[in-house]
Image: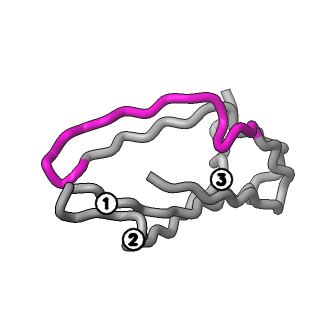
């Protein structure tokens, strides 16, 4: 087993989408952008995603799936992959 650090960094940025939200009906839409940066010496690939979402009523939802936005990106050393979506 290799003990070196993976040096893969994930950052996120989110924003509230008021135009598509309806607070009276407890509908809140958020847009987000995720960046995955590969600072390792290896080529990596994002195969799966897992989200654990807790809403304001403490309802918990788990999301599992292949890749992100229909892709399983390969990220070369020193490169990054960015995608945007909403919930």
Task: Identify the residue shown where x is 76% and y is 53%.
Answer: 40
- The span picked out in magenta is 55-72
Q: To which residue does mark 3 refer? A: 8
Crowding at mark 3 (Cα within 10 Å: few <14, some 14-19, many 20+): some
Query: In which quarter of the view is residue 22 placed?
Result: bottom left
Q: To which residue does mark 1 refer? A: 28
| Residue 64 picture location, percent across and down | 49, 29
Spatial separation of the CA atoms under disc 1 and disc 2: 8 Å
Please say if the residues under marks 2 and 3 sit with CB atoms less than 8 Å apart.
no
Please identify, in this view, whether the residue under mark 3 or under mark 1 is nearer the observer: 1
Spatial separation of the CA atoms under disc 3 and disc 1: 31 Å
Secondary structure mainly formed by the magenta segment? loop
- As for residue 56 lying within the magenta part, the answer is yes
Q: From the viewer's perspective, is 55 left or right of 5?
A: left
Q: Secondary structure at mark 2?
A: strand
Q: Nearer the viewer, residue 22 or 66?
A: 22
Task: Identify the residue shown where x is 66% and y is 47%.
Answer: 6
| Residue 18 picture location, percent across and down | 37, 73
Q: From the viewer's perspective, is 30 left or right of 85?
A: left
Q: Which of marks 1 and 3 precedes in the sequence? A: 3
Q: Secondary structure at mark 1?
A: loop
Crowding at mark 1 (Cα within 10 Å: few <14, some 14-19, many 20+): some
- As for residue 24 lying within the magenta part, the answer is no
Q: To which residue does mark 2 refer? A: 16
């Amino acid at each position: 087993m290799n003990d070196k650090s993976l040096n893969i960094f994930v950052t996120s940025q989110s924003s509230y989408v008021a135009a598509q939200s309806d607070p009276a009906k407890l509908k809140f839409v958020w847009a987000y952008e995720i960046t995955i940066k590969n600072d390792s010496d290896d080529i990596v690939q994002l195969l799966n995603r897992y989200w654990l979402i807790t809403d304001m009523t403490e309802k918990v939802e788990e999301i599992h799936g292949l890749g992100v936005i229909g892709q399983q990106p390969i990220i070369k050393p020193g490169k990054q992959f960015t995608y945007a979506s909403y919930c």
